[in-house]
Structure formats: C-alpha cells, structure tokens
Image: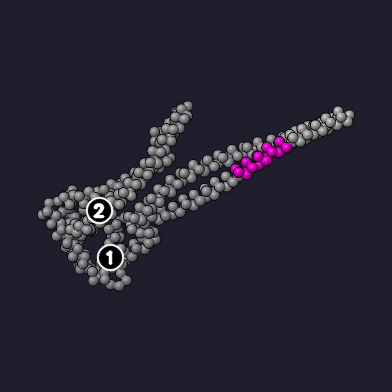
Amino acid sequence: EQIVEAQKEVDLLTGEYSLVTSYLTDMEEIEALPEEEREELNRIARRLVALEQERQSYRDKKNRMKDSDYYRIRNMEEDVAEGIRKLKEGEQYGSKIKQDLQRLDRERYAYEYRKREIETIMNNQRGMAVIFVVAFVICMAMLLVLQFALKMDAQIGYLLAVGAVCLAITIVWVKYTNEEKEIKRVGRAINKLIQLQNKVKIRYINNCNLVDYLYMKYNTNSSKELEKLYIQYLDEKEERKQFAEAEAKTEYYQNQLSGKLSNYRVATPDRWTRQPAALYEKGEMVEMRHELILRRQALRKQMEYNNNVAETARQEIKDILQQYPAYATEITEVGKRYGVM
C-alpha cells in the first residue's frame, strides 16, 4: 500500500514537474533567438508594458487591489480556483490527519499503560503462587511435626492444606493465563497501531509537502487569504472592463506576441503575454527563472521522498522474502495483486 500510494504521488508530481520544466525550456529557446527576431519580440513586449502604464492612473485610485496581487492572481487565474480548492482540502485533510495521529498516540499510550498494568498483575500473581507454595511447605512441615512429634491425627490437616493450595494455585493459574492472553492481545493492538501510525505519518508528510508547495506556488499563507485575494481580483477585473479600448489594444499585441512565439519552439507562448517585461528586462527573466527553479526543486524533493518510501518498502518485502522463504509464493501473490511485483 505504501508503494502504490507513493507511486500515485510521483505520477501526480511528474505532470507539474514537466510543466515547470517546459517553462524553463521556453526561456532557453527565447534567449537563443537571433537578435533581429528578439528585437521584434522586445518591441511588442515594450508596447504591451506601455499599455499597462496607460491604465496606471486607474490603478492609483485608493482602496484598489495592489497591482502585485492583481497580476500575480491573473498570471495563475486559470488554476487559482482549483488551487484554492486543493489548499482547502489539503488544510482540512492535514488537520484531520493530525487529529488521527493524536488519537492514535492516545490509543497507543492507553494500550501501553494497560500492558504495564497486566505485567504488574502477572508479576504479583507469580509472587502469590510462590507465597502459596512456601506456605504449603511450612504448613506440611508443621503437620508432620504434630503427627510424629506430638502423635496427633493430622490427616484432616493434610487434606485441608492440599485442598487449599490446589484451589489457590488453580485460581492464580487461571488468572495468570487470562492475563497472558490479554497481554498478547494488547501487544497485537500496539503493533497494529504502530503500523497504522507509520502509514498515516507518510500521508501527513506528503500532505504537508503538497500544502507547502501550493503556498509557495500561490505565494500565500492560507486558503482563506488566497480566496479573499481572488474575490478582490474578480471585483477588480469586472471594474476594469470599462477600459475597453486599452484592453482591446492589449489583446491585439498579446496576440501578436503569442503568434510570433508560436512560430518558434515555445511550448507556452501565452505565459509570456502575461509577463512581457521578462522578454527584454534581464532582471525579470532572472527572477522568473529563479522562481521556477525553486518550484522544480520542491517538486523533485517530493518525488525523491516518495521514491525513497517506495524503495524502502520494496526492500522490506525483499527482507521478508529472505527471512520467510516458505511464504514466498503468498508474499509474491500479494505484491502482484497490488501491482508492485
């Protein structure tokens, strides 16, 4: 199950990793263009930036959404709603997993406490058994003295002593056997809880990594913060429709830029229409590359973690096969059923 879950995580992360890599590849293609073609792209990009500046007077109005937030959300508008949903699910799921881990810890502590109690009871019962045997020996010795030294009839005493010690030992043995069964049951429960905790911890770490990556991707601290910003963005976007002429010109040049980029080996030309300054300002391009590299490193770290989890689980299966070769067929069938062997 750990291998299957880790492989699913890797498959999900691989798509995002490929997308980020394609952005970096586009940068290399653009930077490798001939000077004349690059200058034409820069001209269009500068025109786009100038059109943005024409609308600056509107954006300077009070109580408006910050430009940095507006363009940041617009750059990821297509998937920000999905991002909010994923963040909410991740935060809620993380909270539930954390509660589950706390509950499992409490249950494990309760079982361990019960185990210590049982061990104490069993030690006491062993001590009681020793006391009963010692008392029986002393009693028998006294009866022998009474019988042979004082010539008294001790037959009834023998019967009572034997009966008493048999009854006491039987009661202690029954209780001891019951406690022995109970401690085995508690031990199995503790082992099951430990296995469940390990599985839940893997889910918790994967979920934390995913949520942290989404926080970094959307540059936010919580889903509520991102959702509030997104609602502000939608209101702002609606108000900006009144600038139809400027928008029309912007769209025209964006189409020009996208069309020209499509003629080259640029996989995501539309991304550059939303960040035209990066085409002619080296600082913007460097900052953009740095962000993408950080995202790719974060994804690679998650992928390596899940690959390590899967590899560790596979090694554990191999170790079990080596330790219990008689069960190799059954173990292999289980592995095949899960698609890991």
Q: In the image, is 98 to the left or to the right of 70?
A: right
Query: Crowding at label 2, few (<14), some or many (≥20) Cα neighbours within 10 Å?
Result: some
What mark, if any, has residue 289 been given in the picture?
2
Q: Residue placed farthest to the right in the image?
A: 151
**Residue furthest toward the left?**
36
In the rendered view, tell whether residue 267 sits above or below residue 53. Answer: above
Label 1: how many residues lie within 10 Å, few (<14), some (14-19) or many (20+)?
few
Q: Mark 1 or mark 2, which is nearer to you? A: 2
On screen, residue 49 versus residue 65, left or right, reads left
Q: How much space separates mark 1 and mark 2, taking CA atoms?
A: 21 Å
> Residue 272 in the image: x percent, y percent?
21, 56
Tell me the quarter of the image containing the N terminus: top left
Kindly identify the amino acid type of the residue bearing the numbered disc 2.
Answer: Arg
Q: List the single residue furthest toward the bottom.
A: 62
- The residue shown at (47%, 52%) is 98
According to the image, label 1 marks what residue?
A: 67
- Decide: marks 1, 2 in contact (CB < 8 A)? no
Q: Is residue 276 left or right of residue 153?
A: left
Expressed as whole percent of the image width and height from the top left, the position of residue 268 reads 23, 51
Q: Secondary structure at mark 2?
A: helix
Which stretch did the figure color magenta?
Answer: 115-131
For the C terminus, the image quarter is top left
| Percent of width and height locating residue 300 | 32, 46
**Residue 127 as seen in the image, left or right of residue 183:** right
Do we see residue 72 in this rendering? yes
Majority secondary structure of the magenta segment?
helix
Is residue 121 within the magenta segment?
Answer: yes
**Please, what secondary structure does the residue beneath circle 1 have?**
helix
Amino acid beneath label 1 = Asp
Q: Give above or below for 271 relative to 4.
A: below
